[in-house]
Amino acid sequence: MTNPQVTSVEPNAIRDGEGSVEGSPARQAGQRDLSTAGLIVALIALAGLLAAPFFFYPVFIMKVLCFALFATAFNLLLGYVGLLSFGHAAFFGGAAYFTAHAAKVWGWEPLSAILLGAVGAGLIGLVVGFLAIRRQGIYFAMVTLALSQMIFFIFLQAPFTHGEDGIQGVPRGHLLGLIDLNDPLNIYYFVLAIFLFGFFAVWRIVNSPFGHILKAIRENENRAISLGYRVERYKLGAFVMSAAIAGLAGSTKAIVFQIATLTDVAWQMSGEVVLMTLLGGMGTIFGPTVGAALVVIMQNYFATSDFPVTVLIGIIFVLCVLLFRRGIVGEAIRLLRR
């Protein structure tokens, strides 16, 4: 078997067959400018998130953070590997059930319960990914959707999920037995820490040699195979990581809202995360967060109005596809590069 000598593969080099990935000086300068701009935006966003609970309703911001982490996890698979999954709700909602049961029935400390949910989602992702990565394109998407629906009916019938009632009254408890998460500020900064951890994990994966190989697979899978990479293993690894981080988001949401229901595991949730990612800009690190914030804000604002929010989101999605094909952040990056 061929033993690849390269530790990372630049997607452009694979697509164009270039021997060097250095690029022109102008391109390097542009990349440095984009990196600097991204760092400034990240610092401003972090400062805003730290101050947000003093100006806005903390529970609403925590909802945005949970869905932003969910969309970021999904973007790891769609934006950087090119795999469209319609089954990510199984990991998001499944982790919520695991965490809710561990916290309420077993009396687990909240952080331990959340980690259990993330690990459980990763194991589900391992099984689903092992079966799904054998197909490509629309067949991959349909396999993930079918398996997700099967998992949905398992949770519907399982005794510990309480069917359509879900698991209600999940206690927030005390973090590490010391910090009372019933306090709004305590739980907000706890959720913010989890979001930052998950966001940094995705950023680190994307910018690692492993991430470069994922981009290479997305750009030219056959070339990656010709270089000796076991593409199936990299796809499965990315799928499991994406599922585990999505489960981290679902587990956190269960603690925040103190409930786990079938809504979190239904196929509509998978559709929502696809919409969030495409609106914000797939393949960008900040895009899913922006898309998730936009969708959650619209759902909250129009929840009490007579205008159906799903129709409005659909209209915005169509306009985004027609006018901003790269998503909001993707178009902003393109303008900066120009």
Image (cartoon, rainbow, N blue to C red):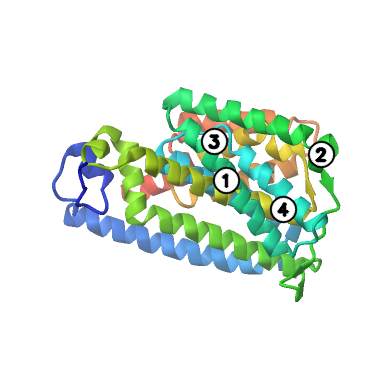
* Residue 173, label in figure: none
Circle 2: residue type: Pro
Residue that badge 2 annotates: 159
Residue 178: percent from left, percent from top = 75, 76
* Residue 128, label in figure: 3
Q: Earlier in the sequence, mark 3 or mark 4?
A: 4
Residue 64: percent from left, percent from top = 65, 52
Separation of disc 2 and disc 4 at Cα? 15 Å
Between marks 4 and 1 in the image, the one whose residue lies nearer the viewer: 1
- Mark 1 residue element: helix
Separation of disc 1 and disc 2 at Cα? 20 Å
Q: Residue at x 49, y 52 (%)?
A: 286
Quadrant of the image containing the N terminus:
top left
Circle 3: residue type: Val
Circle 1: residue type: Leu
Q: Earlier in the sequence, mark 2 or mark 4?
A: 4
Dividing the picture into quarters, in which one does residue 300 lie?
top right
Residue that badge 1 annotates: 123
Residue that badge 4 annotates: 99
